[in-house]
Amino acid sequence: MNPQAKLIFALSLTLGTTPTISSNHWIMAWTGLEINTLAILPLISKSHHPRAIEAATKYFLVQAAASTLVLFSSMTNAWHTGQWDITQLSHPTSCLILTVALAMKLGLVPFHFWFPEVLQGSSLIVGLLLSTLMKFPPITLLYLTSPSLKPSVLMTMAILSTALGGWMGLNQTQTRKILAFSSISHLGWMAIIIAYSPKLALLNFYLYTLMTAAVFLSLNSIKALKLSTLMTTWTKAPSLNAILLLTLLSLAGLPPLTGFLPKWLIIQELTKQEVALAATIIALLSLLGLFFYLRLAYCATITLPPHTTNHMKQWYNNQPTNTMVAVLTTMSLMLLPISPIILAVV
């Protein structure tokens, strides 16, 4: 793909996200979602591999259906209340339809089936965009409409997402699919808290984006698409592999790393809101995610491949680590001590 085309698609992604997160009118928000979808499709299918074309087709169909539901929900609300303002969503049917539409956009259970397949058919960089930037507009809409949405529906989806995201990631051997199920699991944590503390859900999303970007860019640097490849990369970039171990543990939510902060605050807030049972369940379900993060970390740094395999050890790469990777990994590990400042800003 030539640089001019890449620039146009990158600008379209930015221009698609901006109206959705800044507008008060449903039609403008819907237009932004459509521009976003159309801008990412050529990036998914640019390799011309059948798997990439299939991923782009699945992504288009799911996102088109979700956008239609967003428009239908807003029109139903306008029909009954005369309001096109995003924050004035009050009709019960519209609220339910919008919850379903945004769950499809985000990949929350039970509308998650498209996400691992699309991520598997994309490159790591496009997978990073799908896991982070493309989820920002739907999360913003969820944030703006959170007072109108039913907490019980969101809580059910959240617990199912954390359970299935952890459970289905256990047996995967492809790093992109593991990160897709990781994303579904993290979205469960955002969905459970958004009705009680929307700012906390946004903080969780920002920190999740930070850590996921660090992992995706690290894997892209060492070109690791499968666990078997990950086992042989310790000879290529030993320092990056060691840092990847800590970043994965941060993504799992282990103290004293950055990933522990959102989980700690969410469990604290849920306990204050007297839904301690849900907090206990989601905390226990996060152990499933911890298992496959540990498996990734074990493959990357601790184990050596058996001598009977056909994998050759890779040459040591003497190039310095990418600055972006260094900054993101540092932030993924070191932000917990300054959590009072973060909370004061948020």
Image (cartoon, grey):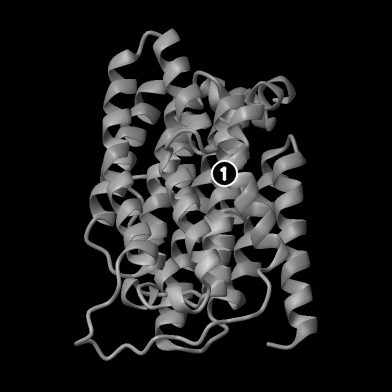
Relative height, residue 78 to residue 40 (above, below):
above
Q: Residue at x 32, y 37 (%)?
A: 286
- Considering depth in this image, is 243 or 164 the residue closer to the camera? 243
Residue 102 position, x and y percent, is 49, 43
Q: Is residue 317 left or right of residue 344?
A: left
Residue 244 position, x and y percent, is 49, 59
Looking at the rendered image, the quarter that the C terminus falls into is top right
- Considering depth in this image, is 67 or 199 the residue closer to the camera? 199
Residue annotated with mark 1: 333
Q: Is residue 13 left or right of residue 302?
A: right
Tag 1: residue type? Leu
Q: Residue at x 58, y 46 (%)?
A: 332
Relative height, residue 108 to residue 122 (above, below):
above
Residue 265 position, x and y percent, is 50, 22
Q: Quadrant of residue 130?
A: bottom right
Q: Is residue 113 visible?
A: yes
Relative height, residue 206 to residue 314 (above, below):
above
Q: Secondary structure at mark 1?
A: helix
Looking at the rendered image, the quarter that the N terminus falls into is bottom right
Q: Is residue 79 visible?
A: no
Q: Is residue 338 left or right of residue 298?
A: right
Residue 324 position, x and y percent, is 70, 61
Q: Looking at this view, name the residue that lies furthest to the left.
A: 308
Relative height, residue 300 to residue 144 (above, below):
below
